[in-house]
Structure formats: structure tokens, C-alpha cells
Amino acid sequence: MKKIKMNWGKAALISLPFFSITIFWQAYDYIVPLILSYHFHISTVGYSVIMSIDNIVALLFLPLFGVISDKINSKMGRRTPLILWGTIGGLFGLVAMNMADTMQLAYSLETISVSAFVLFLIALLIAVFSMSIFRSPAAALSADCFIRPQRTKANAMLTLIGGLAGVIFAILGRALLSRGFSITIAFVAIVMVIVTAVYMIFFRENKAIAHVQRQNAELGLTDEKTQVGDNKVTKLSKPEFKSLFAILGVVALMYMGYNAFGTHYSNYLTKYLLQDASWTTPYLLRVVLILIFAFPAAALSSKIGRRKSALIGMIIIAFSFLGLGSITSANVSFIYIWFVIYSIGFPMVSINAGPMVVELAKDRDTGRYMGYYYIAATVAQIITPTLASVFIETLGFGYGSITWYAFTFSTLGAVCCMFIKLGDAKPIMREALELASEEVLD
């Protein structure tokens, strides 16, 4: 039997569209509120409403384009056409927003140019719509291009590449802000063009899919689930549906805690822990450690399974938020310890949730199922900032309450994990699994 090695180079290559997505949203979330507030003089409530548009668009269109990508049959493949056109649309929207901002600055520093503001909103809609076109298809590539036992490792690489985009923007993109928004936007646009060009030049989706089909045949994995080519929707059995519902519940509950803590972290740091807002080291450390621990988490899941890994990860996350709840301004340095613990648990859940979802699907509709994953994550992101605000204002601990809020939802997520019965890779002969788990580059 031919050895099936984990091709990390291919995993990195197919993760490049996700790099593009991440750096776009890092720039968008950081720059757009500043433009709306300082240049267009929009109130906090006003720009908060505008900033919620992307979540609404995501909720509507991420699952739709996941389904559409499943049905595409082109020379470029199923996902690549949407990746290409979505990137082009996102770049067009980004550049047009910058043009509108320039028009506003040329018009007045005190009043709003209606034409510039309308152009900005139209460009914003084009950008967020275009970026929603290929998020689900880009994530589905990790499932498409690797046999099922290797998908968690491929998702770990996706996490690393996306995280690197965030780190690069945090270090370089924000440093460019002192030279103006236009320079920063140009930097992001150039990076998106470069990574998309590399992906388009060196990756051939149809060839990669054919290669995976041959690997499935060599390992004896070929069955109805691994066949690609028809448009029949997966019909889940009752146990499969229950497990899918539980997995999506874990995703939603995890992001309820994660996003709420991230949204209110700056106020938690400054108003509760009484630290300067410039103290970014703990948060940056957490981001970097999550990327580093993604690969050990993938290795662990290949040994004990995705379900057990996710359960242990949720328990660790809940424990870390419980520990953060004990921190005050007097012992603030302990935040490093609890962030390290959190960074161990989070990737154990995040890199396994997506593969567990698509494990229940047939390979022909992984885009649809990644859409389900993003529905759960997006609904959580829409609800949790406001719900957490209510929690903060009513519990009596001020912004210190955010840790208890995150602990509550993380604990519920751990409970939800216990109801997941399916989602690990299909059992195959021991020799084949060992070969599929090798981590040597082709």
C-alpha cells in the first residue's frame, strides 16, 4: 500500500484565500469605524449599526454561497471561481471606500458630503457581499483536498495562516495608520492581490480533488460519502442530525464567550483592571499561542478523536475564564497564566468543530455544511455583544462580569459537547489510519 503523507505545503497553499479573508476583515473592523467616526462624523450608535451590516450579510449569504459552490462544475473547480471573483469584488469595494473617504476629506472636515457618504455605503456593501461569496468555499477546500483523517490537521494549517494574517496586520497594518488610512488600505489590497495570485498560479483544484479520490481508493475509503460529482443533498440519519445540532451548538456557545470577551476586553482591561489601553502584550501573546498550539491540538485529536479533544478543550476554556474572574488590579500579572491556559483549550475546539461538521456530510456538499458552521458562528457574533452588555450592567461587577459571562457559555459549550456522538473520521483499517496520519512532507 502506498504511504499517504500529510502534505503541509498543499495545506498552506489552499489556506491562502483564508489569509486574504482574514487580513481584509482585520483592516475593515479596525479602519471603518475610525473613518465613519472621524471623517463622516457618524455617532457611536450610527457606526455600530453600519458595522453590523457585515454580520447580517454573512448570515444570509455564507450558507448560500456554500451551497452554490457545491453545484459549480468548472475548469477551475468548485470553489476557485468564487474565491477569484469574491476577492476581486472585495478589492473593488475596499478601494472604492477609500475613494469615498478621500472625497469626504476634500469636501469638509466639519460636514458630511452626501455623495461621498452614499458612495462609501455602496462600496461597503459591495465589499462585505463580495467577501461573503468565498468564505464558506475557502474553508471547504480544507475538507475537499484531504482525506477525512487528515482534515483536522489541514484545518490547523488554515487556523495558522489566518492567524498570521491577523498578526501581520496588527504589526504592520496598524503601524502604517500613522501615515493615513489610504496607505494602510493600499497595503492590505496589495497583500490580497499577492496571496490570491500565488493561489491561482500554483493550485489546481480539480487536480487536487482527483488526487484525493485516488488516495481514498488506495486506503479503501471510497463509499457514497467520498464521491464527488452529483448534486444530491446529504440526508442525515437521526443520530447524525443530533450530533450536527450538538456540534453547531458548541460552535455557537464557544463564540458567545470568545467574541463577548474580545468585544469588551479593552474596557475590561482599562476600567476593571485599571491598566493602560496600550498594554497589548497579553492579548497578542494569546493570539500567537493559539496559532502555536493548533498543531499539537491536531496531533492530539488524531490520537484520542475530535469529540474528546473538543470536550477537553471546552473544559479548559471554561477553566481559564474562571481563573480570569479571580484577577484584579492587584494581581493583574496572572492574566498571562490564564491566557496561556486559554490558548491551549481554544484550538482544541476550533480546529475540530469544522471537520466534525463536514464529517457528517458527503464530500459533494461540504460547502453547504461549512455554511451551517458559519451560521452558528455568525448568530453568536450578532447576539453576544449586546447580551454581554446587559450581563455587565446587571450583575454588579462592571466589566469584570465579562469573564463570568464567558465562563457561563463556555461551560454550556462543554455540556453540549457531551451530546456529540458522531463526527470523528470514519474508522478504517489500522494500517491505513497510521499511514494517513504521517506528518512528513511529500
Image (tube, grey):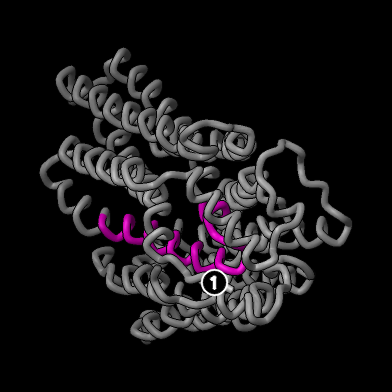
What is the secondary structure assignment of the residue under circle 1?
Answer: loop
- Is the residue 259 above or below the residue 276 in the image? above
Residue located beneath label 1 in the image: 2
Q: Can residue 106 be seen in this view?
A: yes
Q: Which of 318 and 304 is in front in this view?
A: 304
The residue positioned 79% from the left and 70% from the top of the image is: 421
| Residue at the extreme right of the image, as rendered | 238
Relative placement, left or right, of 162 versus 62 is left
* Residue 229 belongs to the span the image colors magenta: no
* Residue 146 belongs to the span the image colors magenta: yes
The residue positioned 56% from the left and 52% from the top of the image is: 144
| Residue at the extreme left of the image, as rendered | 179
Residue 406 x %, y %: 57, 68
Position of the N terminus by quadrant = bottom right
Residue 85 x %, y %: 42, 30
Magenta stretch: dominant secondary structure: helix
Residue stretch rendered in magenta on the structure: 141-168
Q: Nearer the viewer, residue 7 or 57?
A: 7
Relative placement, left or right, of 228 versus 186 is right
The residue positioned 39% from the left and 23% from the top of the image is: 121
Relative placement, left or right, of 143 versus 105 is right
Total label count? Answer: 1
- Is the residue 359 above or below the residue 48 in the image? below
Residue 363 x %, y %: 66, 50
The residue positioned 35% from the left and 45% from the top of the image is: 199
Residue 323 x %, y %: 51, 83
Q: Callout 1: few (<14), some (14-19), or many (20+) C-alpha neighbours within 10 Å?
A: few
Three-letter amino acid code at disc 1? Lys
Position of the C terminus by quadrant = bottom left
Q: Can residue 395 be seen in this view?
A: no
